[in-house]
Amino acid sequence: MSTPQGHPQRWLILGVICLAQLTVLLDNTVLNVAIPSLTRELHAQTSDIQWMINAYSLVQSGLLLTAGSAADRYGRKKMLITGLALFGVGSLVAGLADSTGRLIAARAGMGIGGALLLTTTLAVAMQIFSPEEQPKAIGIWSAVNALGFAGGPLIGGFVLDHFWWGAIFLVNIPVAALGLVAVVALVPESKNPRGDRPDLPGAVLSTIGMASLVYAIISGPSHGWTSARVLGTAAVAVLVLSAFAWWESRADEPMLDLHFFRDPRFTGAVAGAVLIVFGMGGALFLLTQHLQFVLGYGPLEAGLRTAPLALTVVALNFTGLSAKWSARLGTPVSIALGMVCMAGGLVSIAEVDSGGYAGTLLGLLLIGAGCAVANPAMAHAIMSAIPPEKAGVGAGINGTLAEFGNGLGVAVLGAVLSSSVASGEPLSAALGAGQLVGAVAVLVGGFVAAGLLRRAERVSA
């Protein structure tokens, strides 16, 4: 558990868990650049490619709450070790796969490991740092998310230029092995002292419900929002998640305590997080197309051109500047200010100098500054509204919101793009329209979260 001074090796431990987390995040994007190679060498069909990508994200998003709960109940160190082992073994099987079916199965196994890693890393960070240092630690943890976003296509492109496609998975193995040794040697064990019994019905219902919901969202653009597949899966998601809420409200030892939602700090952070990730996830999805189809850059060059966003986040969070600003301004103002910067950045990309890179660069710098201030403040608001013994569940909620909001943003803003193009608008105007919708969602999300958090501060005062 956290102490007033924090764990004596807390910064070294944070470096270890961030390295493990970075590997998982890179794997979310690195496969995209290997699609041509997989199509050629494994004779993969379009449906195979979709399942190679979706098997990982569906399993990971479906298991985040369950993984966080397991970490609280059985020990965060144990689950961190289990996640690294599963991720390493899955990477080995994926790298040596000689068929699409084997690769899809390996990716699903990696998704289990990824869910355990994403939840335990944030939970461990909350345990080893004192409350005063937690904002800076979460800022560094959040900066790693930005590195994962920017680094996946770059690393994938470099590896594929020099090796065969399997190498993009095999490079995970030494990182997982190093992480295992470091976690065993350095990370202290922590868990819920009550040792609650496992909530198996809750785990099953949340996994099926979230996986169904994410699948419906990512299937909408390709299969049609009114198709039987999408509507049927969405109906399953609604029914199962409703059953999950019903069960959790009646279980003696629930996996997700629904009383959390009575805390205005928690509901404010949750509402804002969904809208913010919705706007950012969808808008950044459109950004890659803007760079390639409007400004004419190749995939690798487009990846390099997005680097200023991640570098800004890293610079502000690793130096502790964003944590200092947040401490001075307070959480509500920090979130509102960050969202204004992010929305301004999206408007700049959509409207300023659309024929060149200058407006895009300004937009990326603004988005990076906004992310550096707002995202750690939002994650800290969620985690601090939950008792320390439930830190794993808190991390699972945070990760689930990110997965859900990102998938929804890509689907909805992608639909805005498609409908604009279908109505006869040029591609650059259609991409700009999507970016502007994302900017509005980010701005609304920021002010909703800031307002609710401000009200919560007044109530507690």
Image: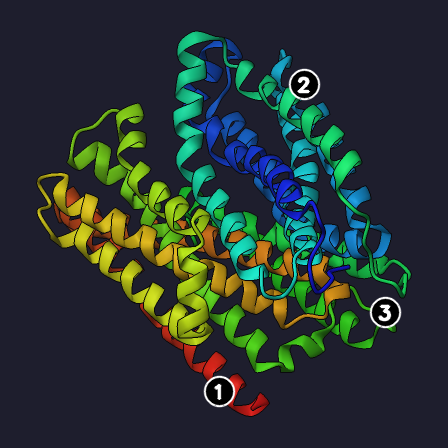
Crowd rating for badge 1 (residues with CA inside 10 Å; few <14, some 14–19, many 20+): some
- Image coordinates of residue 358 in percent, x first then y, are 13, 43
Q: Is 315 displayed left or right of 92 in the figure?
A: left
Badge 2 marks a residue whose secondary structure is helix
Q: Which mark is residue 43?
A: none
- Image coordinates of residue 228 in percent, x first then y, are 52, 51
* Quarter of the view holding residue 311: top left
The amino acid sitting under disc 2 is Leu
Task: Name above or below for residue 255 compared with residue 447.
Answer: above
| Residue 300 in view (yes/no) | yes
Badge 1 marks a residue whose secondary structure is helix
- Image coordinates of residue 16 in percent, x first then y, are 64, 37
Residue matched to label 3:
253
The amino acid sitting under disc 3 is Glu
The amino acid sitting under disc 1 is Arg
Mark in front: 1 vs 3: 1
Report how far apart the C-alphas of labels 2 and 1 lie in the structure.
50 Å
Q: Is 70 displayed left or right of 174 in the figure?
A: right
Mark in front: 2 vs 1: 1
Task: Compare marks 1 and 3 and give the one earlier in the sequence.
Answer: 3
Q: Which mark is residue 92?
A: 2
Q: Quadrant of the N terminus?
A: bottom right
Report how far apart the C-alphas of labels 1 and 3 lie in the structure.
30 Å
Q: Is disc 2 in contact with disc 3, using a CB cutoff of under 8 Å?
A: no
The residue shown at (47%, 38%) is: 148
Residue matched to label 1:
455
